[in-house]
Image: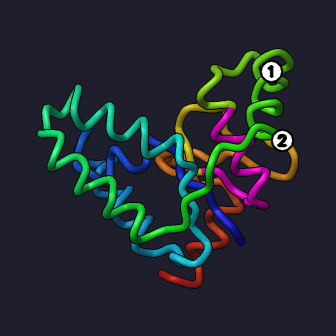
Amino acid sequence: MRIALDTNVLVYAEGQGDELRCGKAVQLIDLLSTQELILPAQTLGELTSVLIGKAKRTPTDTRDAVLGWADSFEIADSTWPAFQSAFDLVADHQLPMWEALILAVAAENRCRLLLSEDFNQGFTWRGVTVVDPFNTSPHPLLAHLLKPMR
């Protein structure tokens, strides 16, 4: 099952945020198959902004961190058709543009899940279900993936 990660998962995995979410993000990424995980390119741009702006990392350290993510996982580019779909998500579902683009890229890349805390839990669009991996009661799709690995 292909899974896309939203920026917040990466930010927590980089140690930015509360200890519980940071630990859970690292554990989650370690448990999931790297062949199934994709990173929409948009998430790496947003991660760059957070690491330089909020975390006050140097541009060099930030570049190294972002390139490390890019070396570890498949990167899915934002295409014009994904932008067009994102415009529809903004208009039809009142999603913020950049979140809509991440969801559209996940759908375009045949992901079944988008792990994010920025949407309504269980929101499904074009076969992609958004799951908050930090929710205290795990969504059944995510629980199913993690169960054999416990």
Q: Which residues are magenta?
A: 101-114
Q: Which image quarter: residue 147? A: bottom right
State the residue lying farthest toward the bottom.
148
x 86%, y 19%: residue: 92
Q: Which residue is mark 2?
A: 125
Give coordinates of residue 17: x percent, y percent.
Answer: 26, 38
Name the secondary structure under disc 1.
helix
Cβ atoms under marks 2 and 1 closer than 8 Å = yes
Give coordinates of residue 3: x percent, y percent.
Answer: 64, 62
Is-magenta flag for residue 113?
yes
Q: Which residue is mark 1?
A: 93
Please state if 130 lies on the left or on the right of 28 as rendered.
right
Front residue (pair 1, 46): 46
* Residues packed near mark 1 inside 10 Å, few (<14), some (14 to 19) or many (20 plus): few
Give coordinates of residue 27: x percent, y percent.
Answer: 36, 66
Q: Amino acid at mark 1?
A: His
x 22%, y 27%: residue: 54
